[in-house]
Each structure stands twice: as structure tokens, then as C-alpha cells.
Image (cartoon, rainbow, N blue to C red):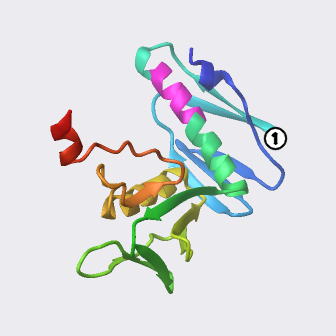
């Protein structure tokens, strides 16, 4: 049995959870999310908490037990408080700005790159080179952040590019430093 899967999920006030025909639907103040159940998993809804249980003890079901508990918990957290990722642009002349809902990123290419965020995601750029991505779906927020980072990943020699906030980029020694050693 999964250790993570055994932990009950508390349901905050204002959040409704419904399970029908193998689909979990969570509705809260920030919006609603739904996800199909995977594996031989059952979800019991007591008004104050959700419990995720495995119907059998197979290896595959045990693997899905903790996964489904975490996914449902992320849905509950998402509709109450939402998720946020921050990216930092490092480099002389590198910048990002909002153009309506879109993000226009200038990172050393011959043209600025326009990024259109999907529905449910807001992307804000600041003058200091900070990009904030917010939404209620944790998976989608992380995916959008990865796509924006992929536009210009950090360079391993000078450290220029788009990186996650707090990401440490290990710089390689240059050609002259390597030849002396």
C-alpha cells in the first residue's frame, strides 16, 4: 500500500468534489478541474475529506494509488489558491513584455519571439526581467514555464538565457582557462 496514497485529502470550505463514471471533478472559487481516474482506484468523499483507496494489491495499482492521491490533492489546492512559477531573464539586452495576453520575448534572436499562453494561464512580465506564470492546473503551469524556458535555455559559458527563479547554472571554464590547466 502506498504511504502517500493513505494520507486523506482535506476539503476546504467552498470546494465541491464529485466522482462519477471514473472522472474526478473539483470545483472551487478559482475555477473547476476534472481528471479521469487511472488504475483500480476508488475515491470516497466524506464532507470534510477525501480518501483514496486501492481496490487490489497489484504492483500497478499501488503505483497509481499515490499518483492519483497527489493529482487530486493538486486539483483541490489549484482551485483554492492556484499555482505560480517564476522565470528570470539573464543577459544584456534580454527582456520580456506583455502585449495584450501574449508575451513578447527578446533574447538575442534576429526577431522577438511571441508566446501565446493557453487558456487558463496568465503570464506577466516585469521590467526587471521576471516572468510570472499563474494558473489553477499545476501540470499546465509547469508545462508553460518549461516551454518559455526552452525559447533560450541558460548558456553554460556566460549564464545568459531564461532560467527558473533560484535555478543554479554551473558555468564551464572558457577556452583560455581550459588550455592553461
Give yes or no for residue 126 being in the magenta stretch.
no
Residue at the spot 57% in from the left edge and 18% down from the top edge: 2
Q: Which residue lies furthest to the bottom in this view?
A: 100
Q: In this view, does 14 lie above or below 174?
A: below
User: In front: 64, or 161?
Assistant: 161
Quarter of the image holding residue 27? bottom right
Main SS of the magenta segment? helix
Q: How crowded is mark 1: few (under 14 residues within 10 Å), some or many (20 or more)?
A: few
115 on left or right of 48? left
Asked where in the image residue 178 lies, by quadrant, the reply is top left
Residue 122 x, y percent position in the rendering = 55, 71
Magenta residue check for 62: yes
Q: Where is residue 177 in the image (x, y as percent from the top left)?
A: 23, 42
- Answer with left or right where residue 78 lies relative to residue 160: right
Q: In which quarter of the image is the N terminus?
A: top right
Q: From what the image shows, is residue 17 above or below residue 92?
A: above
- Check disc 1 and report the residue beneath it: 47
Residue 107 visible in the current orientation: yes
The front one of 1 and 100 is 100
Residue 143 in picture, x, y percent from top left: 42, 55
Q: Residue 105 location in percent, x, y? A: 39, 75
Tell me the magenta residue range.
Answer: 61-69
Q: Which residue is drawn at 49% across and 19% down?
A: 62
Look at the numbered disc 1 and give the secondary structure of its residue. Answer: loop
- Total count of labels: 1
Which residue shows up at 61% across the image and 25% down it?
5
**Residue 120, visible in the rendered structure:** no
**Screen quadrant of the C terminus:** top left
Amino acid at each position: 500500500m502506498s504511504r502517500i496514497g493513505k494520507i486523506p485529502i482535506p476539503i476546504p470550505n467552498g470546494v465541491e468534489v464529485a466522482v462519477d463514471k471514473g472522472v474526478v471533478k473539483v470545483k472551487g472559487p478559482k475555477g473547476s478541474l476534472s481528471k479521469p481516474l487511472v488504475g483500480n482506484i476508488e475515491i470516497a468523499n466524506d464532507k470534510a475529506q477525501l480518501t483514496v483507496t486501492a481496490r487490489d494489491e497489484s504492483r500497478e495499482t499501488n503505483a497509481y494509488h499515490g499518483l492519483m492521491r497527489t493529482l487530486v490533492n493538486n486539483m483541490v489546492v489549484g482551485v483554492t489558491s492556484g499555482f505560480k512559477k517564476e522565470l528570470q531573464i539573464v543577459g544584456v539586452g534580454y527582456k520580456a513584455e506583455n502585449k495584450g495576453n501574449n508575451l513578447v520575448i527578446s533574447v538575442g534572436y534576429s526577431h522577438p519571439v511571441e508566446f501565446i499562453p493557453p487558456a487558463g494561464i496568465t503570464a506577466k512580465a516585469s521590467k526587471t526581467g521576471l516572468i510570472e506564470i499563474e494558473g489553477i492546473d499545476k501540470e499546465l503551469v509547469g508545462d508553460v514555464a518549461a516551454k518559455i524556458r526552452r525559447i533560450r535555455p541558460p548558456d553554460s559559458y556566460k549564464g545568459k538565457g531564461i532560467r527558473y527563479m533560484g535555478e543554479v547554472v554551473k558555468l564551464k571554464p572558457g577556452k583560455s582557462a581550459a588550455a592553461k590547466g
